[in-house]
Amino acid sequence: MAELATIARPYAEALFQSVKADLSGAAVWLDELAAIAQDGALQQFASNPNITNAQVYDLIAGVVKAALSEQGKNFLRTVIDNGRLEALPEIAAQFRALKNAQSGLSDAVVYSAFPIDAQALKDVAASLEKRFGRKLNVSVALDAELIGGIRVVVGDEVLDTSVKARLEQMKVALTA
């Protein structure tokens, strides 16, 4: 949604500028806040006109496991006071993109039909870094529809070597 991206950008940029000394630490608590903010019950609670911003803040601060720095607490208060809680996941995504751009990393999601063990993931990550020509922050997501193989998404680039993709290619070739 373009509107959320537009709303989130100034928050992500301001947070990035204010926590340059500890980007990794900020990314940890920001990702956790974003995950909490996606909860439907929390959004419903926060949108209740009888609930104050302080009550919403207290609830989120009580649930978050990561230690919130003073900047983190102020950031959360600002987001809640401005009614931007629903934009928090997009803020986190844009913050991560800014952090990755500064460090020369890219996020890569490896979709697999089956769990990938640590050594295999390390080998896949090394191959992908050669393929994409940059350092990657690799995470794994399971997708049983792939049948086998992997599908890798790095930014807007996709590398699909799954059985499902190959079957689709064969179908197109046979029906053409």
Image (cartoon, grey):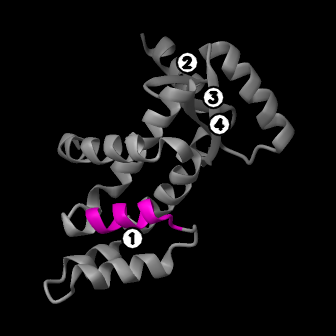
Are the residues flagged by discs 3 and 4 in contact, CB closer than 8 Å?
A: yes
- Give the mark toward the camera: 2 or 3: 3
Q: Is residue 129 left or right of residue 44?
A: right
Which sits earlier in the primary sequence, circle 4 or circle 2? 4
Q: Amino acid at mark 3?
A: Leu
Segment colored magenta: 68-78
Task: Name the element at disc 2.
Answer: helix
Per the model, the C-alpha gap separating discs 2 and 1 is: 41 Å
Per the model, the C-alpha gap separating discs 4 and 2 is: 29 Å
Q: Can the viewer see residue 153?
A: yes
Which sits earlier in the primary sequence, circle 2 or circle 3? 3
Task: Name the element at disc 3.
Answer: strand
**Within 10 angstroms of label 4, few (less than 14), some, or many (20 or more) residues?**
some
Q: Which mark is residue 138?
A: 4
Tell me if residue 128 comes above or below residue 122 in the rendering.
above
Tell me if residue 10 comes above or below residue 76 in the rendering.
above
Q: Amino acid at mark 4?
A: Val
- Give the mark toward the camera: 2 or 1: 1
**Within 10 angstroms of label 3, few (less than 14), some, or many (20 or more) residues?**
many
Q: Which mark is residue 136?
A: 3
Q: Which residue is mark 1?
A: 39
- Give the mark toward the camera: 4 or 2: 4
Residue 49 belongs to magenta span: no
Report which quarter residue 6 is drawn in. Answer: top left
Q: Which residue is mark 2?
A: 170
